[in-house]
Image (tube, grey):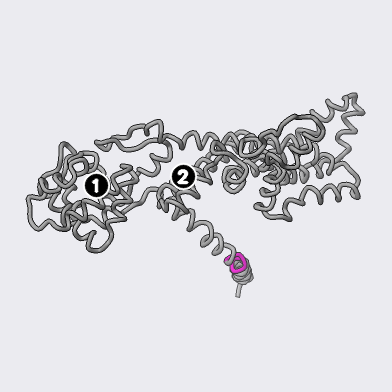
Amino acid sequence: MPLRIKLARVERRRKLRAFSLVLPLLLFILIGFALPIGRMMFNAIHDDTLLTLMPRTSAALSTWDGNDLPDESAYAALAEDLKQAWTRRTTGAIAKRTNYELPGVGSEVMSSARKASTLSAGPYKAALIEINPLLWGQQAVWSLLKRGSSAYTAYYLLRSVDYQYGPNSQIVASPPDHAIFRDMFLRTLAISLGVTAVTLLLGFPVAYLLATMPPRYSNLLMIMVVLPFWTSLLVRTTAWVVLLQQHGVINETLMGLHIISQPVQLIFNRIGTVVAMTHIQLPFTLLPIYSVMKTIPPSHIRAARSLGAGPFYAFWKVYFPQTLPGVAAGCLLTFILCLGYYITPAMVGGPNDQMVGSFIAHYTNEELNWGMASALGAILLTATLLLYYVFNKLVGIDRVKMG
């Protein structure tokens, strides 16, 4: 057998062996990460509730032009669907879905279904309008049912950026009292940027000390830096609640030193949120910077000093540019982690400090509105990937190293 064929077989076996070793990790990533993310993205645009539970109405509205009210056949189909839904006890799901887009109509749908179940013959249009003229005599309700004839909807994504469908299915801005999500996304961005900036200001000097101090001192300092990793996130946040509360350790100490005359509000506001998040995120910013600083030869600074540069100039022009890869990696890691915070703002922040994670948890655990939760998560994920792409284009690690 030719040597080349033998080498090809050996190489093929080596690749198969390597792939078999990596396969469990690939399956774990696929099952535990890729599939849930894909399902979340799908749920943000998919909702077949009305199509499944009201098939006759969906079919009848396929030819409706959206002007005025539909004809008798659509009302007859609606009456049959409401009767069947009442019999099968699925009216609640229909009411819940319609209530998402038209708040307040859910109870009216339930009442109409109960009354429609007693209808024996037409004409159904006049009968249903008589049952509830404010519901079945409104074009906005029929426009919603027509949109529901498709298994895919843009409602959740529109609602997540403070837009919604109008009476004629046109896209309009949400009323001011319901337009909360754009401010929430901007708040999440602002808090994440603020925490990232604070951790950089606090972490850079400490990382420099760790990289330049003798090992016996730097090892002790490193233990203090990584100490937060040894306790759970909930415990660390609870500790800040104890420290920052109105009669907590910090306020009592400041009052005992006569620095303040009455307790300062340090919790359930933006101050408490930023302080607690900074404490948790500081190691994530510091450690990448330290790892880069540790590789910078001290001879660079000595060479700059020997050529006449002052201490600050040598640091700023020679040492600091070499730390930028670590600064970029640490800041990016902290910023992305901050975007998904939920527990800390919920415990130490106020109503105006809640981030995207809090709203996702609310729609998931309390309202069971998977569409809105998925849409918010999809927008957050897309924004994170976009910011990461822009970051790499502007100050990417490779660009920093080349600079």
Number of marks drawn? 2
Nearer to us in this view, 299 or 90: 90
Indicate whether 260 appears above or below 229.
above
Query: From this viewpoint, is residue 28 visible?
Result: yes
Q: Are marks 2 and 1 in contact (CB under 8 Å)?
A: no
Q: Residue at x 90, y 28 (%)?
A: 305
- Decide if residue 343 is on the left or right side of residue 181: right
- Decide if residue 126 is on the left or right side of residue 32: left
Residue 78: x, y in percent?
17, 52
Q: Residue at x 64, y 34 (%)?
A: 194
Label placed on residue 274:
none
Labels 2 and 1: the sequence-earlier one? 1
Nearer to us in this view, 171 or 255: 255
Residue 29: x, y in percent?
55, 60
Q: Residue at x 47, y 54 (%)?
A: 365
Q: Residue at x 37, y 32 (%)?
A: 175
Mark 1, residues whose alpha carbon is within 10 Å: few (<14), some, or many (≥20)? Answer: some
Judged from the image, the secondary structure of the residue bearing numbered disc 2 is helix
Residue 249: x, y in percent?
75, 42
Label placed on residue 376:
2
- Magenta span contains residue 313: no
- Decide if residue 51 is on the left or right side of residue 159: left
Mark 2, residues whose alpha carbon is within 10 Å: few (<14), some, or many (≥20)? Answer: many
Judged from the image, the secondary structure of the residue bearing numbered disc 1 is helix
Name the residue that disc number 1 marks: 145
Magenta range is 19-23
Callout 1, which amino acid? Leu
Residue 98: x, y in percent?
30, 47
- Magenta span contains residue 22: yes
